Amino acid sequence: MVQDRQSVTQIPKRDENFSEWYTQVALRAELADYAPIKGFMAIRPYGYAIWEAIQAWLDRRFKETGHMNAYFPLLLPESLLQKEAEHVEGFAPQVAWVTQGGDEQLSERLAVRPTSEAIILPMYAKWIQSYRDLPVLILQWNSVVRWEKSTRLFLRTAEFLWHEGHTAHRTAEEADQECRLILGIYKELLEDVLAIPVLVGIKPPRERFAGADNTYTLEALMPDGQAIQAGTSHYLGQKFAKAFNVKFLDSDNQEKYIWSTSWAVSTRLIGTLIMAHGDDHGLMLPPKIAPYQIVIVPILGKDDGKVLPAAKDLAKALGTRFRVKLDDRDAYTPGWKFNEWELRGVPVRLEIGPRDVTGRKAVLVRRTGGAKETVSLDGIADRIGRVLDEIQAEMFRRSKTYLDSHMAEASSLDDLVRKMEQVKGFVRVGWCETQSCEDTIREKTGASPRAIPLDTKATGACPVCGKSARVFVYYARAY
Ligand SMILES: [Zn+2]
């Protein structure tokens, strides 16, 4: 038996060293690895399969809602990036520049895109002439580069994968509706597919995307009590339209600027997924997104001539309905394989040995825990279908219970400081909407404002200045 790979027992306990646990799970489950260029990572096939599943789900929903994929250049001329002042100021510290092509020094520096508004809007200026050309509903799947000083696999890397949607509309209302539509799709992805409940809201001004009039956000809570931004949808108003001169002739014969949006989720979601569901045994993947929903481990005894063919038949039969992995490697023991597939988060394991073959049954084990179950091979697909649904629902329920029990409200600054320590999650306070009050709260709590809940009327007073609250804000410590 070859047992050369490091075993699962070497993962630190999640609650003893969350940060190291996270890194080890990402590495050992073979989701990603450090690349030989500082701050960059390679996404391994198993991690990329999760991204493909996220992509496939979103691609279907985007196309159902009238969006199409396109592709725009990797490099942005500096003069274009500088057209929107707030935008360039927000991204400048993180931009990587190309200054030379071949042996020729470039007359203008080219930015490796940190985001693509500055190359897409000039194209829209060419393509949009009349109100009949609107709306434009386009996204691209690509990578962007942001020069980060400290990096962590998936959560913060110099290059990451995402999609960026860029839409152009005739009216402000239509652009805002688009932002909310996308927010709804992201919420469905997070909650129904990834089994991660989110708080939805808008960002206070200083937390907005650079240049946006409004940023809608989805915030999830990780087991260490820190919030993570899971996706954003930006209402850009007419700022970018004016900067890039994107105009159309309306039906009243007036020339008007378009209203635009941009929105994204990234491979950061994979980091969120690791943290949200993993345990001391490693990764735990929701069935809807797991690259393999079922792993079949044959238990080869003395009389094993029948086992492998039976396991292959089972894999073939289940493979018509589920994503199945048959682990028939003879270099590893069944016990080693059990640990390996637990570490890699496969929702259901089926064990099949000589006596199971004779009795036409298999042993089913859930990654979420609970008793082993003997299932008949007759009707096993239906049984597994129900089990996968139960696992999906249970994973969401666990995460929701965790989120609900880590939310609180505070009425004064002292109360907020205390609750931040006690609750280790989201604490809601009223806010008068002045920046200095927000700054005071940040300073006293070490937390940042994560989201202003939508359509919620604030009551009470700002805990800093005592003026009446105009909105509620959820604070949390954050990634
Ligand atoms: Zn105030």
Image (cartoon, helix red, strand yellow):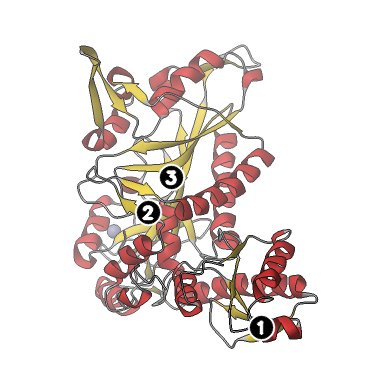
Residue 269 in the image, given as x and y percentages of width and height:
45, 54
Most foreground residue, 348 or 266 = 348
Q: Name above or below for residue 168 compared with residue 433.
A: above
Q: Name the residue under label 1.
A: 354
Neighbourhood count class around disc 3 (C-alpha, 10 Å): few under 14, some 14–19, many 20 upward: many
Q: Label 2 near label 3: C-beta < 8 Å?
A: no
> Which amino acid, by three-letter code, is at mark 3?
Thr
Which amino acid, by three-letter code, is at mark 1? Pro
Can residue 304 be seen from the camera position used here? yes
1 or 2: tag closer to the N-terminus = 2
* Residue closest to the eye, 288 or 65: 288
Q: Does the residue labelled 3 lie within 8 Å of ligand 1?
A: no
The answer to whether one can see residue 469 in this image is no
Q: Which of 214 and 352 is in front in this view?
A: 352
Question: Which quarter of the rendered picture does the N terminus lie within?
Answer: bottom left
Position in image of residue 230 (x %, y %): 44, 54
Cα distance in 3D space between marks 1 and 2? 37 Å
- Give the image location of residue 348, x and y in percent: 59, 73
The residue to which callout 2 is attached is 32
What's the amino acid at mark 2? Ala
| Figure quarter occupied by ligand 1 | bottom left
Q: Is 46 placed left or right of 147 in the picture?
A: right
Residue 138 spot, x, y in % from top left: 56, 31
Q: What element carries label 3?
A: strand
Judge by depth and name the residue closer to the eye, 158 or 352.
352
Measuring 29% from the left and 55% from the top, which residue is drawn there? Answer: 152
Which one is in front in this view, the residue at disc 1 or the one at disc 2? 1
Q: What element carries label 1?
A: helix
